Amino acid sequence: MTSSARPILNRRLAEFGTTIFAEMSALALSTGSINLGQGFPDTDGPEEIREAAVRALRDGRGNQYPPGPGIPELRTAIAAHQERRYGLTHDPDTEVLVTAGATEAIAAALLALLEPGDEVIALEPYYDSYAACIAMAGGTRVPVTLRPSERSFRLDLDELRDAVTDRTRLLLINTPHNPTGTVLTREELTAIAELAVERDLLVVTDEVYEHLVFDEAEHIPLATFPGMRERTVTIGSAGKSFSFTGWKVGWVTAAPALVAAVRSAKQFLTYVASGPFQYAVAEALTLPGTYFTAFREDMRAKRDLLSAGLAQAGFEVFRTAGTYFITTDIRPLGESDGFAFCRTLPERAGVVAIPNAVFYDHREAGAPFVRFAFCKQTEVLEEAVKRLRSL
């Protein structure tokens, strides 16, 4: 019997309940609504990569524990991908670590690099696991808010500089940015890099949407900037790049000391995961550039379809430069509470979305914003647009 005077859940996690994704996905099922809330594709990735996973299973590769850092084939493929696309060279044996998705990579990095009381600056709104992982590591999160400007969300570099204190240990940067769809520019990244070097800060960069940038936007890894190679932990993911989110294959690339630190924490989380899928992802990373071009263009067309439909339904639509999410403002519809709007939207229109306020410490700053995912089949998006017109 536990004492009624002491809560069962420890105080670090007391503020975190069931994720909004679980709540909204359950609502989609119970109402038969189209789920544009949680960010997972409704079709599988390339058939040859799925068959590569089947082949690995049948050949007995990865059915037992794979090596702790990840299978050599995948670590080599990750290193080759970073060099081919960005000119970043990594030793597959000492500078690459395979994780159980990007979420574990984030958790392991923060658990490894933070001491209790260290401050972590993150770009608000942020993926909900950031706050939970900072809390589990005993750190203190310091949000710097991306603010609406000319139909997009932008970073105030002066606000970022002012947020750094003597207790700041780490910058947690996400670009392309979920949920706003912002892609940080070369000028913004240069300023972040200069700040990190000047104040001797570590940086963890979540770059899982690296292959989903649109129009004139360009993804530039922070590790490519002067002074950043030795202080940056870069996180990637197969789920977002190849539409196999259930495989949970992510990775870290960084200097040897940083990878060793992250591995020290990771080995006591899952130890290893996704054995046969690692072989398949190793093959996926060798796909020709035409795959990534076609993937990006398909998502761009879906972005345009849903953006136009949301605008016609009365939303103010922010421009998505990267990821597969669209942020909207519901105030033109006469609404101001994103939580209430999203909880009634399934009954009103048969569509599920996510209130952006869940990604904010300053809930009031995100109150009127709602996120929709467009990583769905075209006919599903067309039906969603049709339903949303009822608003």
Image: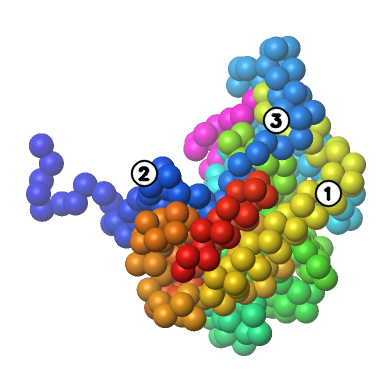
For image coordinates 46% across by 77% down, the residue present is 333
The residue nearer to you, when weighing 264 against 80, is: 80
| 210 drawn magenta | no
Q: Where does the N terminus fall, quadrant-wise?
A: top left
Start-end of magenta stretch: 258-275
Kindly identify the amino acid type of the residue bearing the numbered disc 1: Ala
Q: Which residue bears the numbered disc 1? A: 294
Sequence-wise first label, 3 or 2: 2
Kindly identify the amino acid type of the residue bearing the numbered disc 2: Ser
Q: Is residue 281 at least partly visible in the picture?
A: yes
For image coordinates 66% across by 85% down, the residue present is 150
Sequence-wise first label, 3 or 1: 3
Q: 235 above or below 245?
A: below
Please tell me how crowded label 3 is: few (under 14), some (14-19), or many (20+) other residues with Cα within 10 Å.
many
Q: Residue 190's x, y, as percent? A: 77, 76
Circle 3 or circle 2, nearest the eye: 2
| 271 drawn magenta | yes
Q: Are marks 3 and 2 in contact (CB under 8 Å)?
A: no
Sequence-wise first label, 1 or 2: 2
Q: Which residue bears the numbered disc 2? A: 30
Kindly identify the amino acid type of the residue bearing the numbered disc 3: Gln
Q: Residue 147's x, y, as percent? A: 57, 81
Distance between the Cα atoms at labels 1 and 2?
35 Å
Please tell me how crowded label 2 is: few (under 14), some (14-19), or many (20+) other residues with Cα within 10 Å.
few
The residue nearer to you, when weighing 65 against 212, is: 212
Q: What element carries label 1?
A: helix
Q: Which residue bears the numbered disc 3? A: 278
